[in-house]
Amino acid sequence: MTAPAKSPGRSRKPGIIDEIPKDIAVSLTEAGGLPWLCSLIPAESSLHDQVVIHKALADPLRLKILFLLSAQPLCVCVIKHCLRIADSKLSYHLSVLKEAGLVESRHDKNWLIYSLTSTGKTVAEQKGHNSP
């Protein structure tokens, strides 16, 4: 038995572009193709930083802390009063936010004052107080 004759225009192996809807393939090719699209994926280190921030924002108490600190820098006792939570719980949540780079602290005599970092301010503005 003889092998089927190759069609003149199909000497290459089919690729992903051949397997997706034509309109997607055309617009993808016009934009720069698969190499361009794959180059849009951020570096692992950048993704890690974003994951840490998103995990920090995944708790309602930490979002509440961000909103409080968006008004002004605050001492722990004021944050604790507004949220009505134990010291240990507040300490944990503040450390998560600090590790994510969203809040920072400074000593003022016997007080520890927390404030938003520039990243924390950006996040608080994006979340907005009136968001559903």
Image (tube, helix red, strand yellow):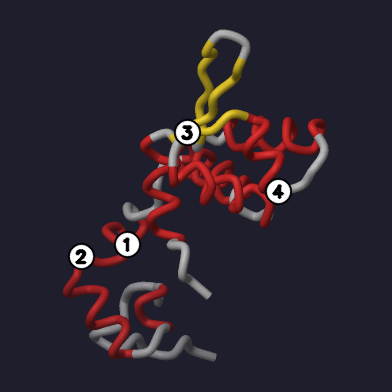
The tag earlier along the polypeptide, 2 or 4, is 2
Residue 70 x %, y %: 44, 46
Nearer the camera: disc 1 or disc 3: 3
Residue carrying label 1 = 37
Asked whether 40 or 65 is in front, the reply is 65
Identify the mark at residue 32; answer none if there is no mark. Answer: 2
Does dot 2 land on a helix, a strand or a loop? loop
Sequence-wise, the earlier of marks 1 and 3 is 1
Mark 4 or mark 1: whose residue is earlier in sequence: 1
Q: Which residue position holds label 4?
A: 83
Spatial CA distance of label 2 from label 1 is 7 Å
- Identify whether 110 is placed above or below 74: above
Hey, what amino acid is under mark 1? Leu
Cα distance between the residues tagged 2 and 4: 50 Å
Residue tagged by mark 3? Answer: 73
Q: Place residue 76 in its image quadrant.
A: top right
Identified at 26% across, 74% down, the residue is 28
Mark 1 residue crowding within 10 angstroms, few (<14) / some (14–19) / many (20+): few
Left or right, 33 with respect to 58, comes to left
Give the distance between the C-alpha atoms of the residues marked 1 and 3, in whole angstroms.
42 Å
Asked where in the image residue 10 lies, by quadrant, the reply is bottom left
Q: Residue furthest left?
A: 30
Q: Are marks 3 and 4 in contact (CB under 8 Å)?
A: no
**Label 1 near label 2: C-beta < 8 Å?**
yes
